[in-house]
Image (tube, helix red, strand yellow):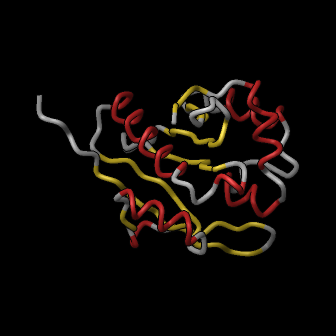
Amino acid sequence: MTLINYFNQYFTFLSHWITGDNLLFQFAGTEFSFPITEKQVTDYQHKNSDRNFYIGLNDNNEAVAFGEIIPQETNIPRIGRLLIGNPADRRKGFGTSFIHLLLEECKALFQIKTVELFVLEDNLPAIKCYQKIGFGVLPDQSRTVNHNRQDYLLLKMAYILTINPE
């Protein structure tokens, strides 16, 4: 898998991947509304110019994944907006590969030891993927978000990067 910066030319993939309001909420929280539009994404990028969007390309240079790296005031970056787009591409290892690339990007951009992410507590496939990589739940840092008049628990997870000795 290859990690590249997101450009608007990839919006077509993103818009086709997000097939409903629940998937959009799982992917992006309450930041966007369904159906997602290129204007929403562009406005978000302008409002959050310190954040980077990435696309994961498979061995055939086809877009299969989307993600974001979010700087935080704590100086611990957070990975967000993670999505393996086509359901047929899920459970094939793309998520694991993509997250490893995002972790390396975090290491290069921030020279830090820890990376965080949030995940819905009922998104068990994602939690299992993150735990396989080495993320652990920070139970005292979970939070609740409301979507369509229903509360959802977001688990905060953290990963400790290994530093290679020089």
Q: Please tell me whether residue 152 is drawn above or below residue 166 in the rendered image.
A: below
Q: Please tell me whether residue 135 is drawn above or below residue 9 in the rendered image.
A: below
Front-lying residue, 62 or 106: 62
Q: Residue pushed farthest front?
A: 60
Judge from the rendering whether residue 136 lies leftward or rightward of residue 31; answer left or right: left
Identify the residue at horizontal 46%, vertical 37% (top origin): 71
Identify the residue at horizontal 36%, vertical 40% (top origin): 75
x, y (%) of residue 110? 35, 31
The C terminus - image quarter: top left
Residue 73 shows up from this direction: no
x, y (%) of residue 19? 83, 55
Residue 137 shows up from this direction: yes
Q: Residue pushed farthest left?
A: 166
Identify the residue at horizontal 74%, vertical 30% (top origin): 10
Judge from the rendering whether residue 114 lies leftward or rightward of residue 143; answer left or right: left
Residue 20 in which image quadrant: bottom right
Front-lying residue, 125 or 28: 125
Identify the residue at horizontal 64%, vertical 50% (top origin): 84
Q: Please tell me whether residue 30 is drawn above or below residue 131 in the rendered image.
A: above
Front-lying residue, 137 or 94: 94
Judge from the rendering whether residue 28 lies leftward or rightward of residue 33; answer left or right: left
Q: Please tell me whether residue 2 is drawn above or below residue 29 in the rendered image.
A: above
x, y (%) of residue 57? 60, 34
**Picture mark count:** 0
x, y (%) of residue 122? 60, 75
Residue 136 in which image quadrant: bottom left
Front-lying residue, 123 or 30: 123
Q: Residue pushed farthest right?
A: 35
